[in-house]
Image (tube, helix red, strand yellow):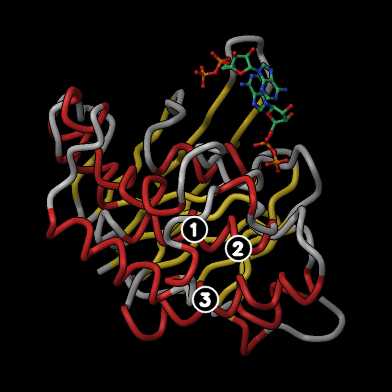
């Protein structure tokens, strides 16, 4: 049974731009899926419909067999815990420590006033250290986020999502601003979380070469539509 399923999904933005066009596919649990396509192809739109950052215009998305479109309040909060997300520009709180940034992955478990006052439990502080161990950054616990390199910042962002015990990680161009060596480090971590923790990973990439190196399956988008969908074993040089 797929963890995520798209059925006849269309997304048209308020200004009339087509974001997604008749998307139909299933994502099996535990897959490392890479979505490729030129800028504007709809990759980011696709990811953002999965955690309801964007609403679809028609069709249906189901996660673990439940349609997600009617979720609100607590059910939407639970969906967003299940689905971690990382971004090209990391989205960290720049002037806060790594520890505070990682703990922020846990704010939906606290009343707002507690998270504002930084009143996180000892258990969650331990959890933050374990999350940083997964990305090899425990030594940076008290460093300010904006003193880290780009690759280190992305690893903090990954640790932050791990605080939710996500079943799925969505990564929207996570390496677009990183150099080649750092790119491998970040992609290796995503691959390890996929293989060792069974987290389903969906990554948007520009580079088909990088997609080939890490994906179980590659989906190509153009103008919001799927124009390519192959298991890595079936991908040839001609592709
Ligand atoms: P990609 O991630 O592949 O670069 P996007 O999903 O960001 O593509 O964009 C797909 C299309 O939707 C593009 O034409 C883009 O300009 C448009 N688009 C994206 N976000 C919005 C928005 N919030 N409002 C209107 N159009 C948007
Ligand atoms: P949605 O209906 O999915 O919430 P909206 O059309 O309301 O999306 O736009 C969300 C935000 O994205 C708006 O603030 C809009 O100004 C901005 N936006 C508009 N066009 C684009 C674009 N081409 N790429 C990215 N963001 C855009």
Q: Residue at x 20, y 24 (%)?
A: 112
CA distance for labels 2 and 1 = 6 Å
Q: Are marks 2 and 1 in contact (CB under 8 Å)?
A: yes
Q: Position of residue 75 (x, y in %)?
A: 15, 35
User: Foreground: 84 or 51?
Assistant: 84
What residue did someone put label 1 on?
Answer: 156
Q: Which residue is mark 2?
A: 152
Mark 3 vs mark 1, foreground winner is: 1
Helix, strand or loop status at disc 2? helix
Residue of label 3? 189
Mark 3, secondary structure of its residue: helix
Mark number, residue 180: none
Disc 2 to disc 3, how far (Cα)? Answer: 12 Å
Q: Which residue lies at the image location 56% right of the left edge and 38% below the top edge?
A: 94
Q: Residues within 10 Å of mark 3 (few under 14, many from 20)?
A: some
Residue 195: name its quadrant: bottom left
- Pointer 2 residue Cβ closer than 8 Å to ligand 1: no
Eyeballing the image, is 166 above or below 86? below
Q: Residue at point 47% right, 71% down?
A: 139
């Amino acid at each position: 049974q797929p963890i995520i399923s798209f059925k006849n999904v269309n997304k048209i933005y308020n200004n009339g731009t087509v974001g997604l066009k008749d998307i139909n596919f299933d994502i099996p649990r535990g897959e490392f899926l890479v979505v490729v396509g030129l800028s504007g192809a709809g990759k980011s739109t696709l990811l953002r419909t999965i955690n309801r950052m964007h609403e679809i215009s028609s069709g249906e998305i189901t996660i673990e067999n439940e349609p997600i479109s009617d979720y609100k309040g607590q059910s939407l909060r639970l969906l967003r815990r299940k689905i971690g997300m990382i971004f090209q520009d990391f989205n960290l709180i720049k002037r806060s420590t790594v520890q505070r940034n990682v703990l922020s992955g846990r704010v939906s478990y606290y009343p707002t006033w507690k998270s504002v006052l930084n009143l996180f439990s000892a258990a969650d502080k331990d959890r933050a250290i374990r999350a940083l161990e997964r990305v090899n950054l425990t030594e940076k616990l008290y460093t300010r986020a904006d003193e880290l390199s780009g690759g280190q910042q992305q690893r903090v962002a990954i640790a932050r999502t791990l605080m939710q015990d996500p079943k799925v990680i969505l990564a929207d161009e996570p390496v677009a601003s990183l150099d080649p060596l750092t790119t491998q480090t970040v992609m290796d971590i995503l691959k390890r979380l996929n293989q060792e923790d069974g987290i389903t990973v969906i990554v948007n990439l520009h580079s088909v070469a990088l997609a080939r190196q890490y994906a179980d399956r590659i989906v190509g988008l153009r103008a919001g539509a799927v124009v390519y969908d192959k298991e890595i074993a079936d991908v040839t040089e001609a592709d």
